[in-house]
Amino acid sequence: MELTPSFMVQIITGKILFDNTGILNELKIEAVHWLNNEYDELNKTVLEMKKYSLWDSLDNLKDCFEQKRVDFPFVYFNSLGILFSEYCQFLRLESIPYNQVHSYLVDPAYIKKYLKSVFLDSIFKEMFLKTLQEADKQKMMETYEDLVNHVFNQMGGFKIDGWKIKSPVEE
């Protein structure tokens, strides 16, 4: 069984009905410990790869838009999901399932019920929610690009011209 954050929340918030040995209470204490662990900061190489990946997603979406492809909405919403997930990793936040992202951003009861950390970038949050609701394809492109640029700024900037990746050689 994988110890996912959602499983740990179930252990923490569940009511113990029967535990002769005390092992379930120990498991609950262990789950609290693991759920409260901070995620590691991304190293420079991984961060650069993520920034390139976000740029590539934006470039692919632009191509899709310019070609007036029928799958533009599909590509757009998948790109938004990837952007949200990558930004959460950068912010050292737990990954949120795509079907819960909106609730996570707007519903305080969700945060309490599932023991989530509050999303601290209020600018991204408002931009993301606006981007989710956009229906005009031109505006969808504009709001998505603005959102990607905001993330790039938070990640220390990104320029594709002359982009190189250097990684340390491991022995």
Image (cartoon, rainbow, N blue to C red):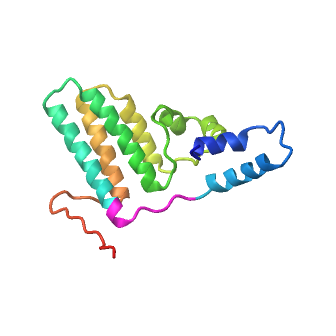
Drawn side of residue 7 relative to residue 28, left or right? left
Give me the residue at 26% from left, 43% from top.
57
Give me the residue at 49% from left, 34% from top.
102
**Residue 170: x, y in percent?**
33, 73
The quadrant of the rendering that contains the N terminus is top right
Drawn side of residue 157 relative to residue 43, left or right? left
Drawn side of residue 57 relative to residue 90, left or right? left
Drawn side of residue 43 relative to residue 76, left or right? right
Query: Which quadrant holds residue 85?
Result: top left
The one of 48 and 15 positioned closer to us in this rendering: 15
Which residue reaches farthest bottom?
171
Main SS class of the magenta portion in the image: loop
**Residue 89: x, y in percent?**
44, 52
The one of 61 and 157 positioned closer to us in this rendering: 61
Query: Which quadrant holds residue 19?
Result: top right
In the image, the segment drawn in magenta is: 38-46
**Residue 165: x, y in percent?**
24, 65
Give me the residue at 18% from left, 33% from top.
64
**Residue 48: x, y in percent?**
30, 60
Which residue reaches farthest right?
20
Query: Which quadrant holds residue 138?
Result: top left
Q: Is residue 70 above or below residue 76?
A: above
Which residue reaches farthest left?
67
- Residue 42 magenta-highlighted: yes
The one of 132 and 45 positioned closer to us in this rendering: 45
Count of numbered circles on the image: 0
The quadrant of the rendering that contains the C terminus is bottom left
Q: Is residue 26 above or below residue 81?
A: below
The answer to whether residue 156 of the structure is visible from this angle is: no
